[in-house]
Each structure stands twice: as structure tokens, then as C-alpha cells.
């Protein structure tokens, strides 16, 4: 079957001069090239814009947008706002859309494999590989703190039908969890391929500020997890990350959000579906 899928990539970039050229080199080298790449320069104060301009001048399918927001590196809302800003200049003439971070190196056949998966499996709505990061010895090791059926937010691909069904990405911490939960709500599945090894050049959370540590718990509240699932998920996170304080930080964030009646990011029907799905996963692992 011939690959006929076309795709767009949006890359949010804030002070990414150290890594961006490597990311764009890996995009340009794809055996199935993108139809267009939009790099959003979000209030960078380093040479990020110069690097973007260099690639724009040499590759007609790469486009730059400048955005001015705060210089704080907060997970969730800021990166999605920047992604959405890039999305504004794209039309609907695509088969899948990619949210890609500016500190990623992709293997050359990455999107060829993603396109084939989408084309051969209409029920797959989200797809991606696995992240590898350098350890203390300088060796690339897999770093995947979530379940194996989760695609990291740094390199997520969505079919157009799935992306529209879930209403795009939520401007909130936890967006890269709620997207997969909502895709399941709408009858789509998430596909991960262990053969697709993605190099992540910056460790998870390396640039996040102190406020960010409570946002995971706030996200669990916003997703309507309820206290039981939040407790279990927080224990799991603390164990996998080998950071016991992650448990208490999550609970502080959860109870703070509940006390202040923070808005939910899913409706009641979606929340009920999410809780049932989460409890099903917990029971399967226990029994």
C-alpha cells in the first residue's frame, strides 16, 4: 500500500538554541517529509530565532511565527498556547498533525512508520515512539515514566479525525493525558512502537519552576479522577520517579484545586468514562 498521508508539524520553542538545530535537522531528514513545519518562537532571548531563520531560508516548508509570552517554563498551558498559536496558520488539508518539542531527535523513518500505522489502522488516533535520554555514563537509556500505551507529549501525532473529536489540546497541565483519555472516549486507540527510539535531549522537567511540582495533582483533580485514583496514581508516580515527595506534592496540588474549586477540563460524562477506564486498568494490574 502506497503511503499517501500528509502531515503538519508544530514546534513550540522557547530559548531552545542549544537543541533546536538538531531537532530540525532530524525533521528535514525524514524519509516521508512533512507538508509544512511551523516553528513558534515564544519570547526567546537566545539565538533560537536565528536558528529558525536559517532553516526557513533553506527549506520552503518551514515557517516561523513569533509569540510573546512570559519567560517562565511552565508545563501544560504555556506550551499548548504556543502550539495553538502555530496551529492558527495551518489549514485542514492534512491527514495527521504533530506536536513536537524543540529538544527531540527523530529517527529518519519516524513519520513514515507513523503514517503507515494511521493508514492501516483507522481506529488509531494517537501514535508515537519512546523517549531515550542520556544517563550519567552518556548512554542513551529509555525513560518512560508512564504506561507503555502512553505517548509522551514531546512527540505526539494525531489523526485529523481524532484531533477534531477531542477538540484539540487542552490548555492545562495534564493535556497529554487527557488527550488520550478523550480519544478513547471517542472510540480511538493510542499506538506506541518500541522500534521508534526518540532521543530526548533535555531531561523531563529540567526547566520547570518550583510552582510546577503541584500542577500534577491539580491536573488529576481537573480530570475528575477523584481521591482514590489520585492516591494510587500519585504512589505510582513517586515510585517510578524515585521521588517520594512527588506523592505529597500531588496531594497538595489536588486538595488545593478542590478547595479553590478549580475548573474541570472534562465534562461529567467524560469524567465518568475516565474514572471507569482508570479503575479498569488498576484492577487488571492488581489481578
Image (cartoon, grey):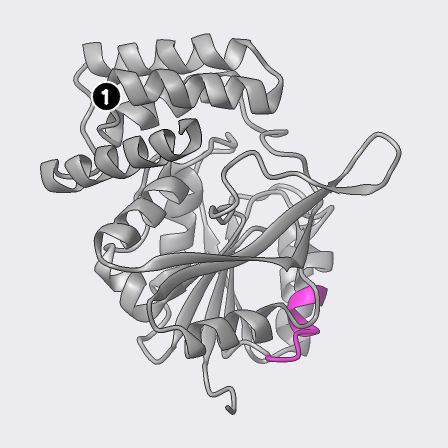
For this orientation, the residue located farthest to the front is 287
Is residue 28 within the magenta segment? yes
Quadrant where the C terminus sits is top left
From what the image shows, is residue 192 above or below residue 247? below
Mark 1: few/some/many CA within 10 Å (<14, 14-19, 20+): some
Tell me what residue is drawn at x 50 percent, y 15 percent. 246
Q: Secondary structure at mark 1?
A: helix
Q: Is residue 137 left or right of residue 29?
A: right
Q: Is residue 258 left or right of residue 217?
A: left
For this orientation, the residue located farthest to the left is 268
For this orientation, the residue located farthest to the bottom is 2
From what the image shows, is residue 55 above or below residue 167? below
Tell me what residue is drawn at x 52 percent, y 32 percent. 73
Tell me what residue is drawn at x 22 percent, y 35 percent. 276
Q: Give how far across and how far down residue 121 sits, in percent.
A: 40, 73
Q: Is residue 146 left or right of residue 200?
A: left
- Asked whether the viewer can see residue 213, the reply is no
Tell me what residue is drawn at x 18 percent, y 36 percent. 271
From what the image shows, is residue 198 above or below residue 110? above
Toward the viewer: 228 or 31? 228
Q: Is residue 40 left or right of residue 196?
A: left
Q: Give how far across and how far down residue 145 sits, in percent.
A: 56, 34
- Mark 1 lies on residue: 226
Q: Give how far across and how far down residue 31 sits, in percent.
A: 66, 79
For this orientation, the residue located farthest to the right is 137
Q: Which residues are magenta?
A: 25-32
Is residue 139 within the magenta segment? no
The answer to which quarter of the image holds residue 86 is bottom left
Q: Give how far across and how far down residue 63 sits, in percent.
A: 52, 69
- Asked whether the viewer can see residue 149, the reply is yes
Amino acid at each position: 500500500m502506497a503511503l499517501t498521508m500528509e502531515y503538519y508539524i508544530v514546534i513550540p520553542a522557547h530559548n531552545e538554541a542549544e537543541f533546536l538545530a538538531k531537532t530540525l535537522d532530524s525533521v528535514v531528514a525524514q524519509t516521508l517529509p512533512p507538508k509544512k513545519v511551523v516553528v513558534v518562537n515564544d519570547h526567546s532571548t537566545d539565538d533560537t530565532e536565528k536558528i529558525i531563520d536559517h532553516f526557513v531560508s533553506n527549506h520552503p516548508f518551514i515557517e516561523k511565527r513569533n509569540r510573546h509570552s512570559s519567560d517562565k517554563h511552565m508545563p501544560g498551558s504555556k506550551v499548548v498556547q504556543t502550539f495553538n498559536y502555530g496551529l492558527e496558520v495551518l489549514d485542514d488539508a492534512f491527514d495527521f498533525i504533530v506536536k513536537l518539542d524543540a529538544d527531540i531527535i527523530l529517527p529518519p523513518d519516524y513519520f513514515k512508520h507513523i503514517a503507515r500505522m494511521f493508514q492501516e489502522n483507522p481506529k488509531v488516533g494517537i501514535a508515537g515512539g519512546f523517549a531515550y535520554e542520556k544517563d550519567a555514563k552518556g548512554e542513551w537509556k529509555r525513560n518512560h515514566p508512564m504506561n507503555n500505551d502512553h505517548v509522551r507529549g514531546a512527540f505526539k501525532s494525531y489523526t485529523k479525525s481524532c484531533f477534531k473529536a477531542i477538540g484539540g489540546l487542552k490548555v492545562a497541565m495534564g493535556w497529554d493525558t487527557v488527550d488520550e483519555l478523550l480519544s478513547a472516549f471517542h472510540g480511538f486507540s493510542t499506538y506506541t512502537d518500541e522500534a521508534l527510539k526518540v532521543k530526548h535531549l533535555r531531561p523531563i522537567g529540567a526547566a520547570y519552576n518550583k510552582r510546577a511540582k503541584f500542577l500534577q495533582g491539580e491536573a488529576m483533580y481537573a480530570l475528575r479522577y477523584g481521591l482514590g485514583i489520585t492516591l494510587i496514581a500519585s504512589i505510582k508516580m513517586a515510585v517510578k520517579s524515585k521521588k517520594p515527595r512527588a506523592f505529597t506534592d500531588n496531594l497538595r496540588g489536588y486538595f488545593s484545586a478542590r478547595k479553590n474549586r478549580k475548573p474541570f477540563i472534562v465534562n461529567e460524562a467524560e469524567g465518568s468514562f475516565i474514572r471507569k477506564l482508570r479503575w479498569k486498568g488498576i484492577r487488571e494490574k492488581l489481578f
